[in-house]
């Protein structure tokens, strides 16, 4: 990622990083006249403070004409359902070969949500016992940056040596158009961030 991202002020930079790889997200279908020139994301594993356990830090950067993007105003950072209906950044994680997985939604407003699934879109429930993640957001005329950190143990079993992840985003334009971005789109007919073949990012620890 560009050096300007690493120098963006409130972003918490990694220490003891087990995985650090910036990946481009691509839009589903062939949308034209996009306000987004580039959308990049990363998911890294970090050691927390003593007694805290491992943490997952997600980082997203949108490059483009942010004046054309509908960016929700800053909020108190509450747990909120339905964030994916508007501009929102998301990641999904599961243990290697596991059916169960977790979904995390992170809005530029700093609102968030986290869900557990027993299988593909099965048994959805809110993840309990998790504190609100620390979410940093910076918006300029040309970039939206979001960084968020959550405890690994709340999302996947801590004995998983390999974690598979999907990284995604929904971008809402000011005219209401939505585009759907992900590392991979296994279904050409519709954007499906839950698709098992979309978990293409691997983290080992």
Image (cartoon, grey):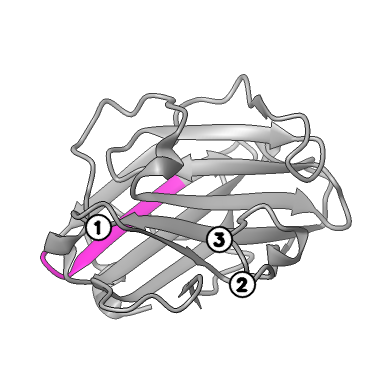
CA gap between label 2 and label 3 equals 9 Å
Magenta highlight range: 141-148
User: Which residue does the image show at 22% across and 48% down from the upper left?
Assistant: 71
Q: Nearer the viewer, mark 3 or mark 1?
A: 1
Pointer 1 and pointer 2: residues touching (CB < 8 Å)?
Answer: no
Q: Secondary structure at mark 2?
A: loop
Please identify the quadrant where the C terminus is shown.
bottom right
| Marking on residue 173 | 1
User: Would residue 45 appear left or right of 34 to someone viewing this image?
Assistant: right
Residue 136 at x, y percent in the picture: 30, 46
Residue 116: quadrant of the picture: top right
Q: Looking at the image, which residue sits at the far right?
A: 97
CA gap between label 3 and label 1 equals 20 Å
Residue 197 at x, y percent in the picture: 75, 66
Pointer 2 and pointer 3: residues touching (CB < 8 Å)?
Answer: no
Q: Which residue is mark 3?
A: 167
The one of 41 and 85 positioned closer to us in this rendering: 85
Q: Looking at the image, which residue sits at the far front?
A: 189
Q: Secondary structure at mark 3?
A: strand
Residue 39: quadrant of the picture: bottom left
Tell me if residue 101 can be seen: yes
Q: Which residue is mark 2?
A: 184
Residue 73 at x, y percent in the picture: 18, 38
Marks 2 and 3, the one that precedes in the sequence: 3
User: Which residue does the image show at 57% across and 63% down from the upper left?
Assistant: 17
User: Which residue does the image show at 69% across and 70% down from the upper left?
Assistant: 186
């Amino acid at each position: 990622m560009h050096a300007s991202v690493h120098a963006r002020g409130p972003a918490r930079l990694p220490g003891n990083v087990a995985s650090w790889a910036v990946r481009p997200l691509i839009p589903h279908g062939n949308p034209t006249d996009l306000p987004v020139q580039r959308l990049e994301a990363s998911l890294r594993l970090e050691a927390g403070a003593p007694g805290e356990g491992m943490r997952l830090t997600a980082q997203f950067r949108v490059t483009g004409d942010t004046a054309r993007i509908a960016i929700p105003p800053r909020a108190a950072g509450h747990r909120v359902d339905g964030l994916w209906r508007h501009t929102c950044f998301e990641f999904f994680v599961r243990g290697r070969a596991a059916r169960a997985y977790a979904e995390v939604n992170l809005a530029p407003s700093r609102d968030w949500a986290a869900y557990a699934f027993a299988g593909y879109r099965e048994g959805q429930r809110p993840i309990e016992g998790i504190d609100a993640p620390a979410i940093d957001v910076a918006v300029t005329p040309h970039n939206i940056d979001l960084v968020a950190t959550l405890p690994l143990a709340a999302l996947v079993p801590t004995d998983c040596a390999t974690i598979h992840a999907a990284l995604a985003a929904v971008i809402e334009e000011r005219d209401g158009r939505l585009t759907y971005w992900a590392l991979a789109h296994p279904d050409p007919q519709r954007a499906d961030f839950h698709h098992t073949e979309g978990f293409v990012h691997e983290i080992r620890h």
